[in-house]
Image (cartoon, coloured by chain):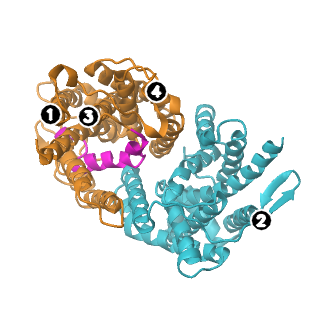
Amino acid sequence: MQIFWQSVGFGFVTASVLAISAVGLSLQFGITNYINFAYGDFMALGAFFTYVLNSEVFHLNIWIALVVGSLAMGVFAVLINHVIFSPFARRFKKTFYVLIVTFGLSLILLNLEYSIWGADVRFFQMPLAKVMHIGPLLLTRYQLIVMAIAVALMLGVHAMLKTTRLGKSMRAMADNTTLAMTSGIDTRAITTITWFLSGTLAGVSGTVLGITEGNLTPASGELFLFVIFAAVIVGGVGSIYGAMAGALLIGLATEISAAFINPAYKLDTAFVILICTLLLRPSGLFARPGKA
Amino acid sequence: MSGIWYYIFTLVFFLFDYFILAMGLNIQYGETGILNFAYIGFVAIGAYVTGAFSLPNSVGTGQQYILGLSLPFPLGLILGGLAACLFAVIVALISLRRLRTDYLAMVLISLSLVLYDVCNNYVPLFNGADGLYNVPEPFAGVLHLTTNSFIPFFAGVTGAIAVVMWLVMGRVTRSPLGRTLRAIRDDDVVAAALGKDVFRNQLKSMLIGSFYAGIGGGLIMEFSGSFNPTAWLPGETFVVFAVIIVGGVGNNIGMLMGSLVVETLLVHLPAFLPDIPGHPGLIEYFDAVIIGVLLMVMLWFRPQGIVPERLRRAATFGVRDDLGAEANLPPDELSALAPSPVVQPGTLQARSATNE
């Protein structure tokens, strides 16, 4: 029973990381209507920005470094969109081309990260954390902070989508870009802001992934990417709330399954759930019409 | 034989092997429009199954693997190709019918990662992270080949297999099946409206492509005698995509050009350069970056590749189906210039000139 509660605790932590990354991916997908296959490398790059601020150059506190590094990743995502993605998306109407371009960018970013930071495992500079008992759960202070960050970001995204003018415009664009444009929404500006948010969320999730896993390599984002895909598809592609629900489900399922099967395969549980979803409810739990 | 020839024939082998792999992905992506981001997984299945059939029983070899039947050369290879086909059927039944392009790509890339994870961690299957090694060299015992003479010999065998597979693929792409596949690629709704079963034809395309993937993978196993998970990281799929896009999507001879430029000149030639002291692997990393950049530059400036796809016209009475007219403009510009290409009397437009 102890092991079970332990894995439930880990499950919530994994779900937090997943929720941040899945919402970042879904936001951008809803607006631009193509999947960013380089998202895992965005995560790793954001984590390395934080790593540089935290360990190599400025020796900033990890949480300050997290904020600055993630915002830097947001700016980087905007630049990538302006220089690469958006020209390709405008020139070629079929999504094939831009999907291959994102796939190619993932190879480029991964290998740039390898050539700068090497293949060694890196660690953030942060003091050892005390373990706390919360009910039956055993969690470190860092894991609690990560969960708090996730909850705060989810509430923030929800508030932004539902109450602000920006959120309203984003939802309009996700439903029908042409109609949004004719209604006077500046779709280019919204796209830019969305890429900034998506990149920032990628940076945050990459960093908190590094914090919860305790290590950081250029490939860590790429291996996590398919778990994000599982969460997004299970939740219903393009649906922000679906992505949150999918993240919770997949996060708990992968960690709890690790209590019963060889932990080496715990991420593959996500894939099994993904396949079951495809067989039973291919549009996901929270399907949006016209997106599947 | 001097070392230089050893290298040259290794390059020749990979030229032909990636020619085969590129033809397989081309029929899936270039002819049918299935964005198979798990392609390298099919290659790996072909390689492992070929190896496992060719190796002797695993007891006492220091490796763990299934099968171990010591089958002679072409049998293991063909079974490897068929194993990749079997896998393709399973994948297609689960995902092909239900998902549109980008979801399918997401599921397939996930599949590639999971397959990788399982092969890496589950040792009894294909020896885990160490992979299979000491796979017997085909014909080595019969023809008394040494390691040095085996390499040029097997490069030649691969070349012969590649030519046969190129001829077969040429027949397939010129056949009615090939036309149906291109129709599905250009617009699957129109193809379905004309009475073509989209799923069945996509499944056929997946099967043919996967067989090519399996054979290409099996040949790597037979050539190098070993195969392990570092050889098929999911990013390797991208190299095959680069081959077909640089060479020219939808054109089989373009695959050979793409293989020459990407696989031989960019992937394998730099591998013979000495490492930069203090930076192990730096050349390899830069190499991958260059391939990625090359692909984007090609897509932007010459999306039709080095050898563009031919514009095919089918005669109504089935006399000729290929007048050899070439589409020299990017598909989107073509469509802007000529919304309806000239249709000669008595001919039917087999595929529209646009890619949209």
**In the rendered structure, are the residues bearing label 4 and label 3 in contact, judged by CB atoms less than 8 Å apart?**
no
**Residue A37 is covered by the magenta coloring:** no
**Is the residue under label 2 in contact with that under label 3 (CB below 8 Å)?**
no
Q: Amino acid at mark 2?
A: Arg
* Image quadrant in which you'd find residue B136: top left
**What's under tag 3, amino acid-wise?**
Phe
Name the front one of labels 4 and 2.
Answer: 4
Camera-side mark, 3 or 2? 3
What residue is rendered at 36% in x and 30% in y? B46
Dot in front, 1 or 3: 1
- Chain at tag 1: B
The image position of residue A77, as x and y in percent, is: 48, 68
Q: Secondary structure at mark 3?
A: helix
Dot 2: chain letter? A
User: Which range of residues does the magenta coloring cover?
Assistant: B228-253
- Return the residue nearer the eye: B315 or A77: A77
Apparent colour of chain B? orange
* Mark 4 and mark 3 on one chain: yes
* Magenta stretch holds residue B231: yes
B24 left or right of A224? Answer: left
Question: What is the magenta segment's predominant secondary structure?
Answer: helix
What color does chain A have in the rendering?
A: cyan
The residue closer to the viewer here, B56 or B115, is B56
> In the figure, is residue A214 to the left or right of B303?
right
- For the question of whether residue B7 can be seen, the reply is yes
Residue on which disc 2 sits? A141
Quickly name the residue at label 4: B65
Please, what is the three-letter code of the amino acid marked with disc 1? Ser
Kindly state the secondary structure of the residue where label 2 is placed. Answer: helix
Question: What residue appears at the point 26 percent right and 31 percent down from the top-left corner?
Answer: B179
Q: Which mark is residue B223?
A: 3
